[in-house]
Image (cartoon, helix red, strand yellow):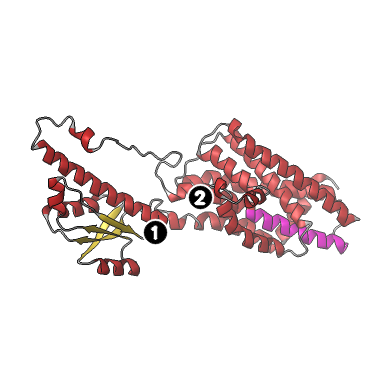
Amino acid sequence: MSFWRLLCAEWQAVRADSAVMLVLFGGILFYAVLYPLPYKHNVAGEQPVVVIDQDRTALSRTLIRRVNATPQVRVSDQVFSVAEARERLVAGAAHGMLVIPEHFQRDVLRGSPTTLSYAGDASYFLIYGTVAEGLLTAGTTLVLETQALRSLMVRDSQAPLAAQLQPVRVLAKPVFNAVGGYLNYVLPAVFVLILHQTMLITLGGITVKDRARRAAGVVSTPLLPALLARLLLFVGLYMLFASLYFGFFLALNGVQAVAPLAQLLLFTLMFLVTTALLSLMLGYCWTAPEQPILLVLISSLPLVFTIGFAWPVTSLPGWLDALVNLVPARPGIQGLLVLNQMGAPWSVLAPQAGWLLGQGLLFGGLLLWRVRMTRG
């Protein structure tokens, strides 16, 4: 049988498997559309805060207007006590509170120390950071402006005031994620993980079924050429899905992609071939086609937090870090993020490319060993 006919036979086996077709053409496209929807706004802005104004002066009202004008927060309500504000936090009507103390205007104009109290819902760390940033910016700006006006009343020149009131100016500029958005941060990595996990399900599952058919004598095509044809078929299909993910869907969601096309295709090909070898190897270890689904269900969430994009690898326990290094998703995600989102040159990808190459050799060797064991 020619290799082309083998390739066609593998494609017929895929087409005849409704579960594999559902994951390939339903699950992958469904995830690409569904996952970005909750994060469409990208940045958690205009978070509702409640204000307790214990001063009730012109300056405190100015501060409230300044807070309401920041892009991070909006004043949803004003109450008379911390207990009332806490009730709104618990009820979810507000994600933060600002307490303006009594004698706030008097102390600011005198230059005496005063304390603005902020609180935020830290169960959502992005919301907490947004609320704290908005309240801190508004409060600090107003106090500095008020103290500058007060100082001008007793000085001849404004020149030395800026340095005295704010000796260090902080310029914060996000690198690689210019808008500081959640979608830009998480979507490229999750797309790679979806490709990895769905290939384990589809290619691993169809390999388990093929083993069963061969054991029953239903399939008579030569095994090693058939495995090579299956690998090429799935790598080709997933190259198409990767092109959709890294091209169309990233652009649709406004996520930057800056890698040169040839380098992006080459690294994606290395990642998919390694993942395909792992899937084939596991297909020769599993005994039931449902086992790939169980593995993906168990491993998906831990992988999100151990691969290195959601939590720093250096903060993982050593044994866990070593274990995750055996998963192609780690060098695949880290390499594609560095290449496509950060614009790094190919030379920077040497560690990730080395890991993928080593994993490919390992999984390919284990696959051949398992095939020989099965034949024996």
Q: Secondary structure at mark 2?
A: helix
What x and y, as percent, mark residue 246?
A: 55, 44
**Mark 1 or mark 2, earlier in chain:** 1
The residue at the point 34 percent across, 68 percent down is 90
- Mark 2 sits on what residue? 187
Q: Which residues are magenta?
A: 197-218
The amino acid at mark 2 is: Leu
The residue at the point 17 percent across, 29 percent down is 159
The amino acid at mark 1 is: Ala
- Mark 1 sits on what residue? 122
Which label sits in the foreground, 1 or 2? Answer: 1
| Foreground pick, 180 / 302 | 302
Question: How far is disc 1 from disc 2 in space, using C-alphas?
Answer: 23 Å
Residue 6 in view (yes/no):
no
Residue 283 in view (yes/no):
yes
Q: Is residue 205 magenta?
A: yes
Q: Is residue 279 magenta?
A: no
What x and y, as percent, mark residue 210?
A: 79, 59
Q: Secondary structure at mark 1?
A: loop
What x and y, as percent, mark residue 280?
A: 75, 52
Say which mark, if any, is on residue 364. none
Question: Is the residue marked by circle 1 packed among few (<14), some (14-19), or many (20+) residues within 10 Å?
Answer: few
What x and y, as percent, mark residue 266?
A: 64, 37
